[in-house]
Image: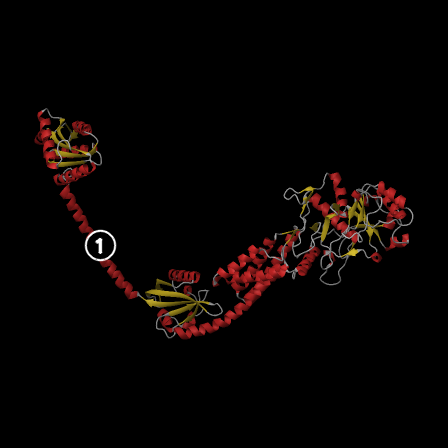
Amino acid sequence: MNQQLDKRFVKLIFGLKQSLSRGHRELITAASVAVCVLLLHSIGLLQSLELAALDQFFRLRPNESPEERITIVVIDEASLDEVGSWPIPDTKIAELLQKLNVHKPRAIGLDIYRNLPVESGNQELRNAYKSMPNLIGIELLANDKNVNVLPPAGLNQDQVGFNNVLYDLDGKVRRSLLYWHVDNQVHESFALKLALLYLKPKGITPTKAKNNPEYLQLGKATFTRFEANDGAYVGADARGYQILSNFPKPKCQSSSREFCSFRQVSMRDVLAGKVKENLIKDRIILIGSTAPSLQDFVFIPYSSSLMGTAKPVFGIQLQAYFISELISAALQGRPLLKVWPNFVEDLWIFIWSYLGAVTTWRIRHATRSLLSILVSCFLLTLSAYLAFLYGWWIPLIPSLFSFGSSAIWVTSHLAHMQDEWKRSKEFLHHVINTIPDPIFVKNEQHQWIVLNEAYCQFIGYPNKLLIEKSDYDFFPKHEADAFRQQDDLVFRTQQPQEHEEEFTNADGQTYQIATKRSLHKDSAGNLFLVGVIRDITQLKLREKQLKRTAAELFRSNNELKLKEDHLRYLAYHDPLTGLSNRKFFAEQLYESLHWAQHNNLLLGLLFIDLDGFKQVNDTLGHETGDRLLMTIAGRLSNSLRASDTVSRLGGDEFTVILRAIPNVQIAAKVAAKILTSINKPIVLDGYAIRVSASIGISVYPYNSQDSETLMKQADAAMYRAKHLGKNRYEFA
């Protein structure tokens, strides 16, 4: 209910108000105003204004096509004078019905209470009732039987509809009843029964809506049931099946009327046979009183006017409006009047409250602000009107009220801020002139508002020229961009910041400065960015000199390290083949043996001596011999695992350390692979050279557990291989 505002919305608003910073004044103001407006709305203080605005929308809507499906037979003063009495005798009513029925109307609605017989002719009237199944009479329903008006005697219950009318607090009719339960029995309204009779030949009957089975579906239209707090209503009587009436506005048949009604003929003309058949055939014929003396009239939205007296419509015309709306919605899909959910309406009001605050806060110019407010109010009204034309009743008065209240609130706050602003500027100017360092003070628009003499001397411009200007007016763009970025950071975080920057004065001299920025506010909430500058140009020059010295030391240190690495490489590698040398081999063998002992693994040691190398040296020269050794070194490396180590001991002698071999046969396989690789021809300077190798193998721990003995045994095994024919391997 509107009396109990959506708890989630209120919680959101107050949560925002407590948590948002001072930089969100617009949002806090909008939230506060929206809550107040929603409270006023929830207790109904805005209901009458909102309903009046809705009435004006009805009056402003464009005329629709003339209603050719309904003809009203009016009982006017002239007809009463001719009959000579009221109520009209049953004989005259029977005669009227029979004359109408001759022209085959689709349905006839008798909007006259006939619960009691009137003079003679009652039987004749009953006979007319029986002969006209398309006739609908009226009854008045009430929980108090003393207030009820019974239906005409002689009509079946399915030929009777109630004509109860729902009045709002201002006495107008804006809703219609479709169904009402009395004593657990459902009753249909007079308008609904006539509409259903008209739609039945077109195959349109009442069904349950697909999206909500509790709603009535009639052709193209779903009739949303009215709730007690829909739209501007607060705690309205929502008993029965009610809908908000979107009254049609038929085009005027005569330009002399202030607002339009429906096609009308008098009872006197019908009885005299002066009415054309096309005004009756296949139409809904409504019979009712328009005689002022009978006082059967009501007020509807079209009755309102901004100036002058409200104009009522007669009860029979009201029923015509209801029927026309039902038929048009079912056949043409004419929009029905709908409302947003409460939470969406609340959000809509909050949005306009926020726009009112933003419009005034951001513009801050009296004329432009007033113009923007007027344009915004016009756009809000126009959007509500356009939504109304499409069948949506959205909040207008609460939205306008929240928009205007936010604007007024912000305007008064801005006036207070201006007074405090002047006082704060005077105080700041007095304080900062006592400080020798350059100091500036900026507002939220990044303009200088206070500068001390030290700053003016530092930049080289007079105070009057700088005030209310920005960095972009005096500094190169790259410097102004850096200043603006740091200013924004302080405004956004509201935390002090210190940053080093370049500063070019009026003479074109560029300084290195360190600026400490902080944010301050006065009692009105005005924000001031205060910046204190230190000249660090000389300090930066000394820092650069220290950095150059440090860079030179670093470069020298790197050169020494490279030389050290090169010397270490030379100490542990053979300069000809690039393989590890004897020293490196000895260290690796010692470490490998220690690791094998610790992990209980086998280690193989291969001694390799080339066969025929001396002959190559003697015949082709030492240079060719060296190239041969380099090729052999490459083949040895390619024959081994990455974890193995191959070394050159000197001359044509090589060693291989096989780490972590699973068995002795692996050493034999490696030796065989090496022999095969070495045996392949080597082409040097056009000569195909072939050499072979003799290999001795010793294995830890089978042959020995110390490195010196393993080396001797592998060397002895190698010599044994040479004695046994070369190009082979032998185990120790």
Say what secondary structure mark 1 lies in: helix
The x and y percentages for residue 729 are 14, 27
Which residue is rendered at x = 8% and y = 25% of the image? 723
Q: Quadrant of the C terminus?
A: top left
Residue 534 as seen in the image, left or right of residue 550: right
- The residue tagged 1 is 554
Mark 1: few/some/many CA within 10 Å (<14, 14-19, 20+): few
Furthest residue in direction top, as rendered: 725
Residue 332 relative to residue 267: left or right: left
Query: Which percent across, then down, holds residue 583?
Result: 12, 41
Please tell me in which quadrant of the rendered image residue 515 appears: bottom left
From the top left corner, tell me how far across and down residue 358 is, in percent: 53, 61
Instruction: Please state which of residues 564 and 622 is positioned toward the viewer in this rendering.
Output: 564
Q: Is residue 449 visible?
A: yes
Residue farthest toward the right in the current orientation of the protein: 120
Residue 296 versus residue 276: which sits nearer the camera? 296
520 relative position to 251: left or right: left
How was the colour assigned to the protein in this rendering? Answer: secondary structure
Would residue 137 appear left or right of 637 to someone viewing this image? right
**Residue at coordinates 66% horizontally, 45% vertically from top-left?**
214
Quarter of the image that includes the N terminus: bottom right
> How many numbered discs?
1
**Residue 273 shows in the view:** no
From the viewer's perspective, is residue 404 above or below residue 619?
below
Of the residues shown, which amino acid type is indicated by label 1? Phe
| Front in this rendered view, residue 382 or 504 | 382
